[in-house]
Image (spheres, grey):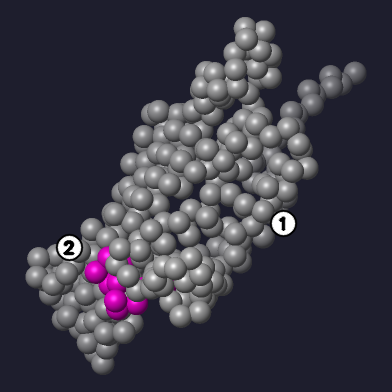
Amino acid sequence: MKQHEPALAPKKKSKFARVDKSLYLMLIPGAVILIIYSYIPIFGLQIAFKDFDIAKGIWGSPWVGLDNFKYIFFSYPGFGKVVFNTVYIAVLKMIFRYITPIIVALLLNEVMHIKFKRTVQTLIYLPHFISWIVICGLMISILSPTDGAVNEILKAVGLKPVYFLGNKSTFRPVLIISDVWKEFGYGTIIYMAALTSIDPSLYEAATIDRANRFQKVLYITLPGIAPIAVLVGILGLGSLLSAGFDQIFNLYNPLVYDVADVLDTFTYRMGILNAQYDLSTAVSFVTSFTNAGLVLISYFIAYKVAGYRPF
């Protein structure tokens, strides 16, 4: 009688084989777009190291090494002001974008009427999905010095009209306020989600100990959302040189260049309007390299402080 051979153990399928192939097929269009618009243009960065002549093309233009960078950073008039404007506006946006959602989330958390809370949440995060072109068009009309709604109200109370978008002292506040109004509702969602993870028994225990609402917020709510708040703040460091091209480009004008011109708009004017492709590429190269470094630093800090790993 023949001895039965032991059954072979089934081979383990690879991780790729266990996943539906259609999921990978869905990635192809996005990957193609990413390669075309993000990776292929990297070869054009060599323009920053050349005396670029559009007639000669990228390959025919002579190399000049770091001359374009030296000229931009040490000789180009007003470039220091552009860098200052970029950092100044970006930092202010970061601060108010960070603080406002936390305050609004804490206030909404105290609302007992569920329908009212949901309605407010919907209304405040809807602006996030509206294009800056649409918002800026509305702002230009509302803040118009001749027939804008805001200036009509100022005239009605006996005050002089203000050219908000053409006045250096008011342009930056308009940028910050409009940016916060557009984005704080979307950021509030993060903190509202964090608030739901707090154990309700903590509030019940605090009630038994006769803690008032302010004490509950101070000793339970804020510590409960502190980890996510720290994480959001750290990850925000990666946008230190991103002041918001879409918003500023659609609102600024030559009257406020001194306080509104940032690296992105400066690059646009040099490259697209003035055809100084080599100099604009040099600025873009340094900006992109710096942003990439800031993102890596923010991820490293987030991992050390909050244990966050993006990959």
Q: Residue furthest front?
A: 158
Q: Which mark is residue 22?
A: 1
Place of residue 274 in the rendered image (x, y in percent of width and height, measured from the top left): 26, 85
Q: Is residue 18 above or below residue 148?
A: above
Q: Residue furthest left?
A: 75
Q: Is residue 12 above or below residue 151?
A: above
Place of residue 292 in the rendered image (x, y in percent of width and height, measured from the top left): 34, 52
Residue at (67% x, 47% y) in the render: 121
Q: Is residue 281 visible?
A: no
Query: Which one is in front, 162 or 141?
Result: 162
> What amino acid is found at the position of numbered circle 1 in the picture?
Ser
Q: Is residue 11 above or below residue 34?
A: above
Q: CA distance from mark 1 to mark 2?
A: 51 Å
Q: Which mark is residue 104?
A: none
Element type at mark 2: helix
Quarter in which the N terminus is drawn: top right
Q: Is residue 165 left or right of residue 35?
A: left
> What amino acid is found at the position of numbered circle 2 in the picture?
Gly
Residue at (52% x, 38% y) in the render: 102
Cβ–Cβ under 8 Å for marks 1 and 2: no
* Image-quadrant location for residue 234: top left
Which badge, 1 or 2, is on the more N-terminal residue?
1
Query: Which one is in front, 296 or 197?
Result: 197
Q: Is residue 194 visible?
A: yes
Place of residue 61 in the rendered image (x, y in percent of width and height, measured from the top left): 20, 83
Q: Which residue is the site of mark 2?
A: 80
In magenta, the rendered stretch is 251-260
Element type at mark 1: helix
Residue at (27% x, 88% y) in the render: 54
Q: Is residue 151 left or right of residue 192?
A: left
